[in-house]
Image (cartoon, coloured by chain):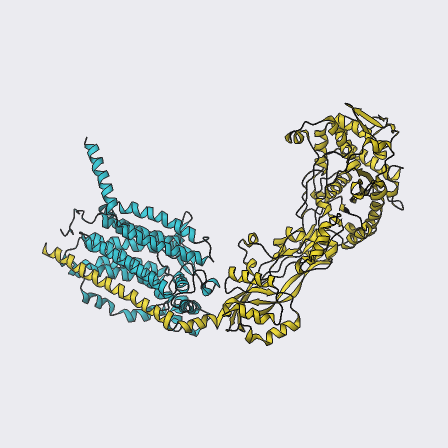
């Protein structure tokens, strides 16, 4: 028993001893820590700040955007800028005061710098001023002792070679917002910009690249003593687009001052050859600052230069919609290929009278002639026989009133109404609504892009989707072959009947003889004039002429077409806002545009070099 | 009737047990884990992911495990001592055969997604086994060299296996842990001296047979400035980080060394450096004070225990915790060679934390069952 007590006592003694030693050892570490942190602290602080290894991130170069033939549309330029490393200056406001004697800073700029300094980390540089002149740079270097914390370095900035022509397609870049900061280390770098709209936004991650890191040994004034190691960043990939810059410019010239848009597609694969929204604007002004007057001009202009009409302008398709109605009727067997319907110049339905555009009527005509002469009464009747829901379903198959797979953001969907839609809005669907839908009026609204897809799908019989992306880093992207696109699922004889009508419109004395191409190449097309307000009986009886109306009340002029008729290659849509009549305004434009397209034949020409390289590698 | 009484007794027993848990120790461990959360939040550049959230979730899970073990009868644990030891040795052999190779050493075993380091479990097994062995020993038997031979072998088997992985740091901690238990069990002073005599010769021989990376560690420790961008980089950067922290530190999330990625493995081995840089001497010493408090609380559990098994287990676990803390902090300050030892409850890493919490669970079981009677010898009442 005594022994056992002895054992416990030994344990207690030795545990106390061990605990004491452990406490002493940890205390020793604390003492050593005090030596390192306090006594030698200033030495290590100097080592950390004056002569330390700094990791500096190098922004990658943003990828270029090229057209089909390798013309550089968006590139990068060296941009000299002044940065401020807050922790290298005791008083950054005084540094800024000194700097502003060399480079003037506005109050707004100073407020932004203040904000960035407050939010940022003291070792990540804050952007002071971009686009420095060589003279300003030299002055800053010479005055470096008075400007602690100021750093001059070369970043890259975005340049657009054709800003006005391509504003709507390419979009622009801007500094990242809070929501863009999710995890990408690149976003913390000064002066980094992200894509805000158009191709720049859609392909932002592809174009962006990854930052490199270089470890530098630097001294107190930020002078680099030596480079220790570097991990190179990866520059953003180049994106080659499907469209042809010269064609784009030619079309823009042809549209002149009109508020108009034109879209040209390769109808076999949906590649966008040109997409013009007129008038345009110069997006580079956004990065240098838009003046009040300029902004007012843009926003007050009734021709809406800031809006991409091709993808987000909504227009009633008018008579261009008749092919969809015809195909719906043929598909539902509510009309035969050669059934003749009579047109006395109007249709009476439940006390309302719906007029044909030809006052005296067209007499009896079949499908081909109804399209050729654009007879309204014929299509009123087909619409009534077929019903709005089947017309709507067919239109959706043809690309109208649906969201398209276009690779730039910001499209509007428009609509081809259904009964359910109207009922969901709390109204009954009236037969009169079906009648006006038969000629693309009423609730039917579409974008010019949708109309071009519509023409392309009728011409090719394939469910093509419009797209801009042809190559990324020189590698062809899927979708460039016709076989990449599924069959439309509309029987060929039906499409052929409609195509025949479109041929007649242009080439057999139909409504658009002015769209006829020179030589023996044939274009098939369809005119459309869509009212923006109802024509009153009084106007109609007094011999109404839309040209006498104020501009904003005149009808829109539309034309959809494809060519060559025998072997369809290109489809287009032209919409001229308040252009009065499709036949008079849009058809001649379509003719000139198609002539330009066929003369260049961009889809048939060999495109840029990297492509061949990438193909050869396979 | 009887059953009901038993149940009532048991439930009374359970409440009683819960009251006897050392809640001060639980609180101290929670405080330490919170330090870990803050440091890991900073290590991730000011975000709860990917380290801090996982850390605290793991801790919560470990806490539950710890309480469960605390309520387990210490006599049951005692009976399983050698089983735990054998399991540890088995896992060590397994890791040599199929383990994952990280940084040139086979240390990890993948158990259904959770990687475990068997050498950590081994140390607990060793503590339990040695405690069980010496629990039976009377004063005379402790003096008998033949009686000391089996436990000596029990220490050397795992040490040999850990050296083979190879993991020099853990092997040395294991040796010291064994030594501490021999010491607490009452082995005479002169026997330790006798064992320590050949150490210099063994060390010289061992140095020649070390892996290159281990030798490099020792060399750079002796003279870190010799190769500032090579193997000495970590130590220099760690010292710069600590030193530039000064008295009050650079402030939360403002540590330049850590955030500019100079500190390698700042979320694991060098987490203490981050604390020293951002919270200065004041913060670092506060953490050390917390560690000392935990060690003393654990030692007190041993001192208040009435049976030898519990005393030795408590002492072993306290020493194990101390070794981790000391080696880690000494390492980041450049006092001893760098050795891949985490700071318990602060460093990121699941295996070490869970094993450590299992150990503290056993420690609390000692506290809860400090006056139970053992059937065999070793009770000092």
Q: Residue at x 58, y 54 (%)?
A: A177
Classify residue A588 by image quadrant.
top right
Image hue for chain B: cyan
Give the x, y percent position of residue A438: 77, 31
Chain ID, yellow in image: A
Give the x, y percent position of residue B82: 25, 50
Give the x, y percent position of residue B131: 22, 54
Give the x, y percent position of residue A367: 83, 30
Classify residue B272 by image quadrant.
bottom left
Q: Nearer the viewer, residue A168 or A67?
A: A168
Above or below, comparing residue B62 to residue B341 in the picture: above
* Residue A388 appears anywhere in the view: yes
Q: Nearer the viewer, residue B176 or B204?
A: B176
Which quadrant, please, contains the C terminus of chain A? Answer: bottom right
Above or below, comparing residue A409 to residue A282 in the picture: above
Q: Residue at x 51, y 70 (%)?
A: A89
> Left of B146 or right of it: where is A216?
right
């Amino acid at each position: 028993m005594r022994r056992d007590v002895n054992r416990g006592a030994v344990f207690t003694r030795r545990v106390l001893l061990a605990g004491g030693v452990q406490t002493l050892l940890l205390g020793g570490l604390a003492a050593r820590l005090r030596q390192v942190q306090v006594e030698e602290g200033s030495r290590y602080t100097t080592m950390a700040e004056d002569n330390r290894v700094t990791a500096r991130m190098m922004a990658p170069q943003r990828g270029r955007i090229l057209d089909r033939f390798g013309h550089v549309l968006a590139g990068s330029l060296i941009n000299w800028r002044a940065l401020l490393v807050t922790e290298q200056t005791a008083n950054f406001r005084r540094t800024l005061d000194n700097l502003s004697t060399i480079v003037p800073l506005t109050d707004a700029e100073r407020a932004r710098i203040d904000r960035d300094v407050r939010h940022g980390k003291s070792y990540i540089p804050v952007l002071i001023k971009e686009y420095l002149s060589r003279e300003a740079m030299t002055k800053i270097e010479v005055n470096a002792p008075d400007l602690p914390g100021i750093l001059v370095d070369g970043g890259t900035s975005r340049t657009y070679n054709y800003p006005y022509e391509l504003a709507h397609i390419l979009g622009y870049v801007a500094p990242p917002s809070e929501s863009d900061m999710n995890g990408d280390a690149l976003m913390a770098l000064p002066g980094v910009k992200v894509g805000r709209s158009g191709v720049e936004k859609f392909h932002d991650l592809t174009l962006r690249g990854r930052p490199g890191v270089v470890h530098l040994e630097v001294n107190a004034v930020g002078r680099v003593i030596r480079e220790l190691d570097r991990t190179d960043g990866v520059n953003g990939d180049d994106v080659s687009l499907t469209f042809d810059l010269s064609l784009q410019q030619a079309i823009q010239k042809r549209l002149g001052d009109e508020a108009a848009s034109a879209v040209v597609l390769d109808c076999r694969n949906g590649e966008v050859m040109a997409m013009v929204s007129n008038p345009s604007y110069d997006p580079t002004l956004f990065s240098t600052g838009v003046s009040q007057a300029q902004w007012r001009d843009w926003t007050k202009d009734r021709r809406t230069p800031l809006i991409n009409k091709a993808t987000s302008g909504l227009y009633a398709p008018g008579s261009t919609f008749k092919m969809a109605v015809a195909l719906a009727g043929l598909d539902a067997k509510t009309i035969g290929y050669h059934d003749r319907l009579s047109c006395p110049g109007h249709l009476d339905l439940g006390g309302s009278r719906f007029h044909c555009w030809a006052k005296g009527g067209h007499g009896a005509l079949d499908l081909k002639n109804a399209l050729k002469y654009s007879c309204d009464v014929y299509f009123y009747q087909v619409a009534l026989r077929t019903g709005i829901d089947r017309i709507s379903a067919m239109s959706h198959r043809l690309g109208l009133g649906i969201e398209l797979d276009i690779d730039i953001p910001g499209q509007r969907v428009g609509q081809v109404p259904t009964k359910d839609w109207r009922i969901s809005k709390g109204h009954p669907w009236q037969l009169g609504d079906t009648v006006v839908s038969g000629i693309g009026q009423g609730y039917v609204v579409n974008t010019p892009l949708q109309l071009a897809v519509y023409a392309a799908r009728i011409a090719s019989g394939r469910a093509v989707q419009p797209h801009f992306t042809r190559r990324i880093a020189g590698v062809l992207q899927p979708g460039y072959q016709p076989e990449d696109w599924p069959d439309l699922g509309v029987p060929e004889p039906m499409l052929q009947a409609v195509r025949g009508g479109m041929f007649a419109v242009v080439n057999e004395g139909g409504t658009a003889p002015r769209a006829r191409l020179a030589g023996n190449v044939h274009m098939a097309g369809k005119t459309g004039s869509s009212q923006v307000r109802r024509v009153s009986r009084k106007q109609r009886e007094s011999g109404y002429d839309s040209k006498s109306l104020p501009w904003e009340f005149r009808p829109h002029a539309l034309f959809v077409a494809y060519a060559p008729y025998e072997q369809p290659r290109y489809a287009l849509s032209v919409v001229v806002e308040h252009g009065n009549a499709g036949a008079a305004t849009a058809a001649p434009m379509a003719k000139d545009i198609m002539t330009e397209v066929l003369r260049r034949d961009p889809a048939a020409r060999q495109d840029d070099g990297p492509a061949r390289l990438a193909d050869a590698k396979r | 009737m009887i059953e009901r009484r038993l149940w009532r007794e048991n439930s009374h027993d359970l409440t009683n047990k819960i009251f006897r848990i050392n809640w001060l120790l639980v609180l101290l461990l929670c405080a330490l884990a919170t330090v870990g959360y803050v440091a890991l939040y900073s290590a991730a550049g000011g975000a709860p992911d990917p380290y801090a959230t996982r850390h605290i979730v793991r801790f919560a899970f470990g806490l539950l495990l710890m309480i469960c073990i605390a309520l387990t009868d210490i006599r049951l644990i005692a009976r399983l001592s050698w089983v735990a030891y054998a399991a540890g040795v088995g896992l060590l052999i397994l890791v040599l055969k199929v383990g994952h190779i990280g940084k040139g050493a086979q240390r990890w075993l993948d158990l259904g997604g959770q990687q475990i380091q068997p050498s950590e479990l081994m140390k607990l097994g060793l503590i339990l086994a040695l405690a069980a062995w010496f629990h039976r020993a009377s004063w005379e038997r402790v003096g008998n060299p033949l009686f000391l031979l089996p436990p000596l072998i029990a220490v050397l088997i795992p040490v040999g296996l850990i050296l083979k992985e190879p993991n020099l740091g853990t092997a040395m901690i294991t040796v010291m842990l064994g030594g501490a238990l021999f010491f607490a069990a009452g082995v005479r002073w002169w026997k330790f001296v006798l064992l320590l005599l050949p150490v210099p010769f063994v060390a010289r021989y061992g140095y020649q047979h070390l892996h290159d990376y281990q030798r490099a560690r020792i060399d750079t420790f002796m003279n870190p400035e010799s190769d500032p961008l090579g193997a000495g980089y970590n130590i220099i950067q760690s010292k710069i980080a600590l030193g530039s922290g000064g008295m009050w530190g650079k402030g939360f999330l403002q540590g330049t060394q850590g955030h500019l990625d100079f500190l390698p493995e700042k979320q694991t081995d060098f987490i203490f450096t981050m604390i020293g840089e951002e919270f200065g001497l004041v913060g670092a010493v506060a953490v050390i004070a917390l560690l000392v408090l935990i060690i003393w609380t654990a030692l007190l559990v041993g001192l208040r225990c009435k049976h030898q098994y519990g005393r030795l287990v408590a002492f072993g676990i306290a020493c194990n915790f101390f070794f981790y803390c000391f080696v880690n902090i000494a390492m980041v300050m450049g006092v001893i060679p760098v050795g891949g030892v985490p700071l318990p409850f602060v460093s990121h890493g699941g295996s070490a934390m869970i094993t450590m919490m299992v150990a503290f669970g056993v420690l609390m079981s000692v506290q809860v069952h400090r006056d139970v009677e053992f059937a065999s010898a070793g009770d000092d009442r």
